[in-house]
Image (cartoon, rainbow, N blue to C red):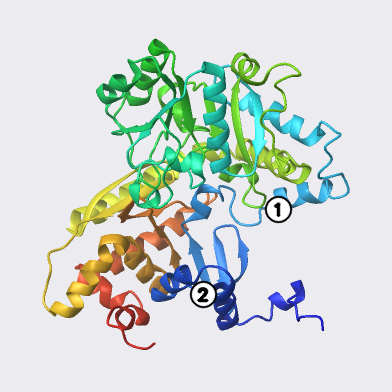
């Protein structure tokens, strides 16, 4: 007997409960519990630009933006039209060099800084980091990799080895050997590792994303590049989240005039629709690593550079340039930062507001334990990992604003809207934040407001 299968036509008819149960049963039960705890398991059925709609027709402002993947917003018509135009072309054909991939690589060479020229396409940011590690090792003949504490570069084995939070590494050891971390922003620590002459690459985010939206001290990236050049180490810029206009320039390293040896890209490159990752490097380094017939197939990807993904990338770059979205991000980012700093002056719960362009973090204080010992203690325990999620839960469920916390610093929520966001939409979010902090001036207040399932979950009650 044929087992009953769900079809595409069934999707529109799925209830929230059915979608939740499928996720819980067949995907990730723990994540289903966590999302349900803060009522993050809504069923969204439509998306356009900065807005998404749930099954009940309620409209939400998306200030997560796919962790930087949705620089053009949801379902941008130019990207969808590009996919339509290539819909009859071969998407995967290994006996061809791929016209669309070659065109996208050409365009990347034109918009990336310095002499970056040769591109390898993959499918995600983690794969781009993997490719950068391999390229650095084979091109330099060295094995050591240095990255930054609290940095985040992905969760595959290689990328996890250079990420800077032990929580995500425990249980997967041994990781790649010869991987070390230094404090973000500390050039003396970096030089101490590079001085041995054994380091193949320094892998760094121009702004730490999952670390809590941390902007480095002025001159840090430039100084790090100079140290790498002094000791023969390759400088790898992880612009997976910061790239394509997010910080107010096309690439965040351009704020300091830094040209990396290897540039890692993903997220926004696919226009929010197709998964695309890439590493871009110089012709000299590419030829050292993979030049000639004998080495040209040492690093490959079945789906990397497929026609649909490349078409999405071509359309994305066109829109970014034609609409000057990097410039828009710079202008609106300053507007949002100013509004948030005004809130910081009024509400002591806000420890710091920081960021650049439309990549902004709000870090919260850890309030002292209060009354209602059992409840407050449970909330404080949850807040050690999920304070940002508790704040985000209130924003979502009361104000229909979508935000999330940063993985390596759970006391920070990020605001990372599409670059097409308007001042009116920013004002709506600032208003929601003001009302949120006015009504919830303590951690306990957030715990009590974060959704009907929080306290029942913490206290072991049945939902």
Determine crowd level at label 1: few under 14, some 14-19, many 20+ residues with C-alpha closer than 10 A. Answer: some
Under circle 1, the secondary element is helix
Question: Seen from this angle, which residue lies furthest bottom?
Answer: 462
Q: What residue sits 46% from the left and 24% below the top?
A: 143
Across and down, in percent, residue 307 comes to 78, 42
Q: Which quadrant holds residue 1?
A: bottom right
The residue indicated by pointer 1 is 77
Residue 233 in the image: x percent, y percent? 44, 18
Seen in the picture, residue 453 relative to 280 is either above or below; the reply is below
Q: Where is 147 relative to 416, above or below?
A: above
The percent position of residue 408, horizontal first and vertical second, equals: 35, 50
Sequence-wise, the earlier of marks 2 and 1 is 2
Quarter holding residue 402: bottom left
Viewer-closest of 250 and 279: 279
What is the x, y in percent for residue 252? 46, 32
**Whether label 2 touches label 1, CB < 8 Å:** no
Q: How far apart in space, not on screen, are marks 2 and 1 (Cα)?
A: 25 Å
> What residue is pinned by disc 2?
42
Left or right: where 104 falls relative to 220: right
Q: How many marks?
A: 2
Q: Nearer the viewer, residue 48 or 291?
A: 291
Q: Residue at image x 83%, y 47%?
A: 85
Task: Give the secondary structure at mark 2.
Answer: loop
């Amino acid at each position: 007997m044929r087992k009953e299968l769900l079809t595409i036509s069934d999707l529109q008819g799925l209830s929230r409960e059915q979608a939740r149960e499928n996720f819980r049963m067949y995907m990730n039960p723990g994540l289903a519990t966590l999302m349900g705890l803060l009522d993050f398991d809504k069923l969204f059925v439509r998306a356009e630009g900065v807005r998404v709609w749930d099954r009940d027709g309620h409209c939400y402002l998306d200030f997560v933006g796919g962790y930087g993947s949705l620089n053009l917003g949801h379902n941008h018509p130019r990207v969808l039209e590009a996919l339509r135009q290539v819909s009859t072309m071969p998407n995967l054909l290994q006996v061809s060099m791929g016209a669309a991939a070659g065109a996208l690589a050409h365009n990347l060479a034109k918009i990336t800084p310095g002499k970056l020229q040769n591109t390898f396409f993959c499918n995600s940011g983690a794969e781009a980091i993997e490719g950068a590690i391999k390229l650095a090792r084979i091109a330099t003949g060295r094995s050591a990799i240095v990255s930054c504490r609290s940095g985040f570069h992905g969760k595959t084995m290689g990328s996890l080895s250079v990420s800077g939070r032990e929580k995500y590494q425990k249980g997967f050891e041994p990781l790649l050997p010869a991987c070390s971390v230094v404090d973000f922003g500390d050039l003396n620590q970096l030089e101490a590792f590079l001085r041995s002459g054994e380091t193949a690459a320094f892998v760094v985010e121009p702004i730490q994303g999952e670390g809590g939206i941390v902007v480095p001290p002025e001159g840090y990236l430039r100084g790090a590049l100079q140290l790498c050049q002094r000791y023969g180490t390759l400088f790898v810029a992880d612009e997976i989240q910061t790239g394509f206009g997010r910080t107010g320039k096309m690439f965040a390293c351009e704020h300091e005039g830094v040209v990396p040896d290897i540039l890692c890209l993903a997220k926004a490159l696919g226009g929010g629709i197709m998964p695309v990752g890439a590493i871009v490097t110089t012709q000299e380094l590419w030829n050292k690593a993979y030049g000639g017939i004998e080495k040209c197939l040492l690093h490959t990807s079945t789906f990397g550079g497929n026609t649909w993904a490349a078409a999405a990338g071509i359309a994305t770059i066109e829109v970014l340039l034609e609409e000057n979205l990097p410039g828009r991000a710079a202008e609106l980012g300053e507007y949002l930062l100013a509004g948030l700093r005004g809130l910081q002056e009024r509400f002591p719960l806000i420890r710091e507001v920081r960021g650049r362009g439309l990549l902004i973090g709000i870090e919260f204080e850890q309030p002292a334990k209060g009354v209602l010992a059992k409840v407050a203690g449970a909330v404080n325990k949850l807040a050690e990992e999920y304070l940002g999620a508790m704040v985000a839960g209130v924003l979502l469920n009361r104000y229909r604003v979508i935000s999330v916390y940063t993985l390596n610093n759970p006391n920070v929520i990020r605001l990372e809207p599409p670059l097409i966001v308007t001042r009116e939409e920013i004002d709506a979010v600032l208003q929601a934040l003001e009302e949120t902090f006015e009504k919830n001036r303590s951690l306990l207040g957030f715990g009590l407001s974060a959704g009907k399932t929080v306290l029942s979950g913490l206290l072991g009650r049945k939902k």
